[in-house]
Image (tube, rainbow, N blue to C red):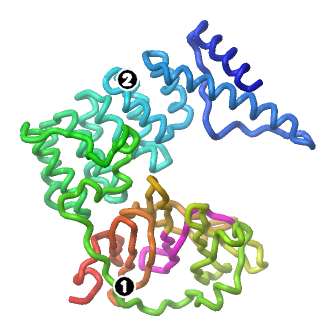
Amino acid sequence: MLLVAAMEFSAGVVADERVEPTNILTPAVDATADGTEYNERHKEFEARRFAEDAVINRGGPKAVEALCRRIEYSATPDDLMRLAEMGTTAESAVPIVVSALSDPYWESRVAAARALGFMGTEKCIEVLRELLVNEDDWRLVFVSVESLGRLKAKSAARDTEAVAAAHWFPPVREAARKALRVFSGKERYVAPRKMKNFRSEFFIYQWPWIDSQSGQPATLVPTFEPESGSLNNREIEAESFSGEVPGRTQLVCGLRIDRGLLLGADGGEWGGGLAFKDKDGKDHILNGENVVGIHRVAVGVIAAGGYAHVFENHGYLYLVDVDAEPIPTARIWKALPGAPIKTGKLSNGGLFVSCVGGDVVISPDGRIAMATEETVGRK
């Protein structure tokens, strides 16, 4: 039934050359007691999505138009990747992709900057150059230097040299040096042999060391300082929160604040959560990331969260506003080299974070750097 409806809708799309945008975030509906209205709306949504995918899979101008409408509605990394795969034939979509660089979703910003290297023109050079000074998300710099390289943007050579010389993350410096070689005609971009399809090539920034010449540094094991307000193992075991799924998620960290507790759960591929439990015992989920550490540092309360499973890998530091009303809030502060594994306070006041993509230290004034004997305070 769903297939027939989708085929009929697809035929109508070809006739009037119009596709209404759909997205995984369906509009809210007032469900009836038995859920009938919701189910019918969901079936309709699935049929339209199926038909829209059929139009996109056929390629050509209609596919570009359909993807543009989707991205204008909600810029997902997957849709940006599909535009990038079309290359310069999707040049008309460049303005929409550029607008996604300011999307509230950090993953979409990175995917947009990445896409411009495959489908963009010299008109994109200036906006990509501006991203090279971003201090909060190394991925934006990583993909932007390659996009500039793919566009052979020699006018951005000086900015790229600055990245190659001084960026804190080695894979970003390597990407910048490679872009400089591409500018001069000494090298060209070829997908790594490990990449089996365009999707793998496009999202390579999630595993930045995969094409690195230097290799990922060995993990350090620093000594952590005791922290005031941090819950010990026994106290964590005694706590629970509504997002916890027995056998899948587990509370692993906690921090006392004046208004109650902040709790972090790790559920691996199932996802975890950052929760606030007020003094009445009621908990509030602040996000659904796997959270492995919550710390009070000079810049405020920081939570380290992320996800690494199969091909996906990301990690963030969240800045928690413990005074926000009616409950604390958490916003992304900085991108990590990958999903965090372990965190701890250092004797020099810094925060150590061991990640899937490398170990880092956040200094008391908020700067991020690779973990070395010096940055962890041993020298």
Name the residue located 37 percent from the left edge and 86 percent from the top edge: 346
Which amino acid type is marked by label 2?
A: Ala
Question: Magenta stretch?
Answer: 285-304
Q: Which residue is mark 2?
A: 90
Q: Quadrant of the C terminus?
A: bottom left
Instruction: Please give the label number shown on residue 68.
Output: none
Residue 119 place in picture, x, y as percent: 32, 29
Residue 226 place in picture, x, y as percent: 47, 93
Residue 101, image quadrant: top left
Give the Cα separation between the discs numbered 2 and 1: 49 Å
Q: Which residue is mark 1?
A: 349
Secondary structure found at label 1? loop
Which amino acid type is marked by label 1?
A: Gly
Q: Could you tell whether 79 is left or right of 161 in the image?
A: right
Is 77 included in the stretch rendered in magenta? no
Name the residue located 13 percent from the left edge and 51 percent from the top edge: 161
Is 290 included in the stretch rendered in magenta? yes
Q: Nearer the viewer, residue 22 or 346?
A: 22
Residue 183 place in picture, x, y as percent: 11, 39
Name the residue located 21 percent from the left edge and 33 percent from the top edge: 151
